[in-house]
Image (spheres, rainbow, N blue to C red):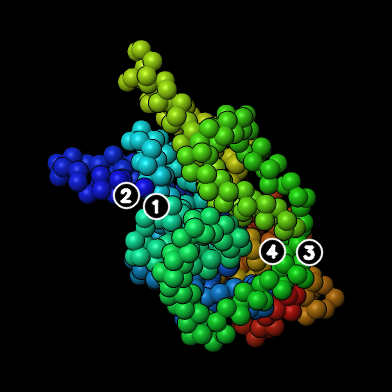
Amino acid sequence: MTSTAARGVASAPAARVHPLWWLLMLAALLRLPLAFWPNAYAPDEIFQWLEPAWRVLGHDSIISWEWRHGIRGWALPTLLAAPMALGDWLAPGGAGGFVGPRLATAIASLSIVASGWLFGARISRLHAVVAAFVTGIWFELVFFAPHTLGEPLATAAILPAAWLLTELAPTRRQLAAAGMLLALAFVCRFQYAPAVAVLVAATSWRHWRRLLPLGFGAAMVLALAGGIDALQGTAPFAWLIANIRSNLLDGRASEAYGGHPFGEYLGNLVVLWSVAILPLALAVWRGWRRAPWLLGVALVNLLFHSLISHKEHRFIFLSGALLVLLAALGSADWIAQLKRRPGWSNRALPLGLGLWLLVSAGLAATGPFASYWSRGIGAATLAGELRHDREMCGLALYEIPFFMLVGRERLAGAVPVYSFDARDPAVGVGAAAATLRAQPGFNRMLARQSMASELPPDFREGRCAMFYDAKVCIYARKGSCDPAPATTFLLNDVLTRIDL
């Protein structure tokens, strides 16, 4: 098939805005404001990517066990470092460095909307409008757009690559571009490799000459990613081997975060999509023939992740995005049929799009997904107060896991951060006693309200907020700090001792 949609955009009259641009604007209006909304779906978006990006810029940050064990690559944090530096320059003090990368990832997510249009345009203008609209407003795609996670970023690369590979006669440049996008997706989320392999095999097995430009494009990105690793002092892609050994072979992730049954992801889809699961399934069944290999990629990705013990719904973000796109194409068939009925030619499309919008908004505001919008807000609220507390000279965490925080710079800036954890052998007889001995080193603490009786008596309760399911408060004492008594309990040293 030819690139009819791309030509359509180029040949539109100058005075008339192409419908795709309106749909991209709608998608952007839903996504970009969320970059400023200080929620965090998962600790990984902060401690696996934003904190390392802050280190790329030469600053201190919280170092999790994944980075100490070398199971993460430096390519993605390095990419995020540029918008982080720009954001911090525009709004110093932690907030700009947080918002900058989120704006960049939200903008990148628009490629999913553009890909929806391009896949739909191969069928009709109606299919293009429906596919772009649905991928633009679907609640999961909107929610995850600004979150700095490998899954949505990889998906934003895979979908345009899939469109390029499924062209009837892609040019060498298009194939090289597809290879670059697929390699970028691999770097962002290497567990998507089986899905990528299926996509490449399905589109190239009859046209093996495509593999040369495709491989050339992929090699360019992989070489760049390996060079970034080398510049950071690690062997190129050593993190990949370490990750497979640690998580897939040794089961570190399952041991730390728990395992789940094989059918967990299907159960998640039933819960998240609720009563809409049946019409969505029927729409996928109707639409998969329009882009059959997309269904194959979605199912292979779902199956592969179902075989891995540790499961999180975001891991199958690619599958969800592809299923929604196929459902959009299937629903466009129904809308086209309805348009042909007397009296429905002008009403069918608004009705269909309105139903999609209603379902998406309803699912976003109900069930388990409703809580995702506020996850991490409490931590951000207390961090904002602490970060602008000019009298704070040292901050101590009392039995507060680091992954409940918002990142070092947003929390405390240049102020030293200490941690008192019962699992730390350095606390001796107990965290309470160690805190009492070390209290000259800090004048602010974060602790669960239920543990207030264990804190040194000079500290008084201030503002409180919910950290997940626990009420956490700021505790303050008057006076200055002498770091010497608390040096043993610097946060990164404690994380090293307890291997977190």
**CB under 8 Å between discs 2 and 1:** yes
Query: Which mark is nearer the camera, 3 or 4?
Result: 3
Identity of the residue drawn at 58% across and 48% down: 296
For label 1, the SS is loop
Q: Secondary structure at mark 3?
A: helix
Q: Could you tell me how far apart the alpha carbons at marks 2 and 1 are, in whole angstroms?
A: 7 Å
Badge 1 amino acid = Glu
> CA–CA distance between discs 3 and 2?
48 Å
Q: Residue at x 75, y 75 (%)?
A: 498
Depth check: give the residue in front, 424 or 16: 16
Point out residue 379 in the picture as x, y percentages from the top left corner.
Answer: 58, 57
Residue at the spot of label 4? 400
- Left or right of 367: which side holds 178? left
Residue 214 seen: no
Question: Which residue is drawn at the image coordinates 61% and 60% (left, top)?
Answer: 194
Gap in angstroms between the C-alphas marked 3 and 4: 20 Å
The residue at which mark 2 appears reads as: 3
Label 2, residues with CA under 10 Å away: few <14, some 14-19, many ≥20: some
Q: Looking at the figure, which quarter contains the C terminus?
A: bottom right
Image side of residue 292 versus residue 93, left or right? right
Q: Which residue is mark 3?
A: 255
- The total number of labels drawn is 4
Name above or below for residue 461 compared with residue 226: above
Give the residue number, with chain letter if any, for mark 1: 167
Q: Is residue 138 left or right of residue 464?
A: left
- Rounded to the nearest whole Å, what is the CA distance between mark 4 and mark 2? 54 Å
Q: Which comes sooner in the sequence, label 3 or label 4? A: 3
